[in-house]
Amino acid sequence: MFVRRISALAGGLVLLAGSLTGGAAHAALDSQAGYVPVSITAAHNVVMPTTIQPGVNTFRVTTEAKSSGFQLVQLAAGYTLDQAIDDIENGLEKGKMGAFKRFEANTTLLGGVNIVSGKIGKVAVDLEPGTYYATDIERNRPSAFTAFTVAGADTGATMPEGSTIRAVKNASWAKNPKSIARRGMLTFENFSSANHFVGLVKLNRGKTVGDFGEWLKNESGPPPVNFGKSFDSNVVGPGQTVAMNYSLPRGNYVLVCFWPDANMGGMPHAFMGMYRGIKVQ
Ligand SMILES: [Cu+2]
């Protein structure tokens, strides 16, 4: 997964797969306005309707692969899928900042969910008419990208209720809320000027956010957090809002973003201070 690869390159960190859990199947919901069924094949190809309605859509995602990273993306006019794939390869995987900057300048990242086989991921997003791609970021190749069109009448659906997290400035988290619900739909409002993703990682017993900061600084020793008890969203661009299903054990967490900063040589935002404590209750 490209985010984790660059995190590993820049900081020696390895994020383990999130523990996102979905609910029971709600087959009846698939026929409701704004529900978009998405199935990802064992070969990481995204299968979904080729045309959906504008407005709020909730993508209901399952995978036949062991795990998948469902991501919605829009490409700027004149920027091709082949260019995007090359820039992901050279920019995000090989750390070439020119390619990474070109990728960020020519894409609008609209969020997504990470899922494992047998679980259901849900991501709600308000889409304008246009052309988009849905991809499984675990495979950076044309077959993993499925084009779809947003056209027609508005779905009339509204964004789900739930706890809300906000990014502000360039690479900062808003100070509030201090706590979020342990499950439901988590809304991420990116009011900042950069791409980000939401990482929630549980602090080990007796450990503090200060310990996490020290661990980032020193890049050595056992982490004070448990990456097995975590959630991470996929990538959300400036000005975008998404909501995703999640379920976590109660406790003290670090809210963190490891997306690389192109102006800092690919340094993950966490190393620029984009982390803070948050309670999951
Ligand atoms: Cu970030």
Image (cartoon, rainbow, N blue to C red):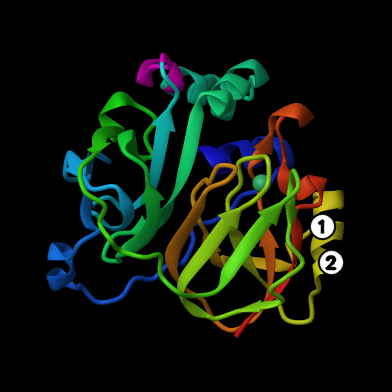
Residue at image coords 19%, 73%: 26
In terms of image quadrants, where is residue 100?
A: top right
Residue for badge 1: 215
Q: Indicate whether 65 appears above or below 90.
A: below
Q: Give the range drawn in magenta.
A: 78-84
Residue type (three-letter) at the residue carrying disc 1 = Trp
Percent coordinates x, y for residue 178 in the rendering: 72, 76
Measured as percent of width and height from the top left, residue 177 is found at 69, 73
Q: Name the residue under label 2.
A: 211
Asked if residue 41 lies left or right of residue 12, the reply is left
Quick one: SS at disc 1?
A: helix
Q: Which of 163 and 261 is in front in this view?
A: 163
Q: Where is residue 25 in the image (x, y as percent from the top left)?
A: 20, 72
* Location of the C terminus (image quadrant): bottom right
Is any atom of residue 137 visible in this view? Answer: no
Asked if disc 1 and disc 2 are in contact, CB closer than 8 Å, the reply is: yes
| Depth order, front residue of 220/110 | 110
Q: Which of 36 and 93 is in front in this view?
A: 36
Q: Tell me the element at label 2.
A: helix
> Does 39 appear in magenta?
no
Circle on res. 75:
none
* Residue 251 seen in render: yes
Task: Please report the residue visible at 75 percent of the width from the left and 58 percent of the height from the top.
Answer: 275
Classify 149 as above or below 157: above
User: Alpha-carbon distance for marks 1 and 2?
Assistant: 6 Å
Rendering quarter of residue 85: top left
Q: At 58% from the left edge and 84% from the top edge, which residue is drawn? A: 250
Q: How crowded is mark 2: few (under 14 residues within 10 Å), some or many (20 or more)?
A: some
Q: Give how far across and how far down residue 80 sits, in percent.
A: 38, 17
The type of residue carrying mark 2 is Asp
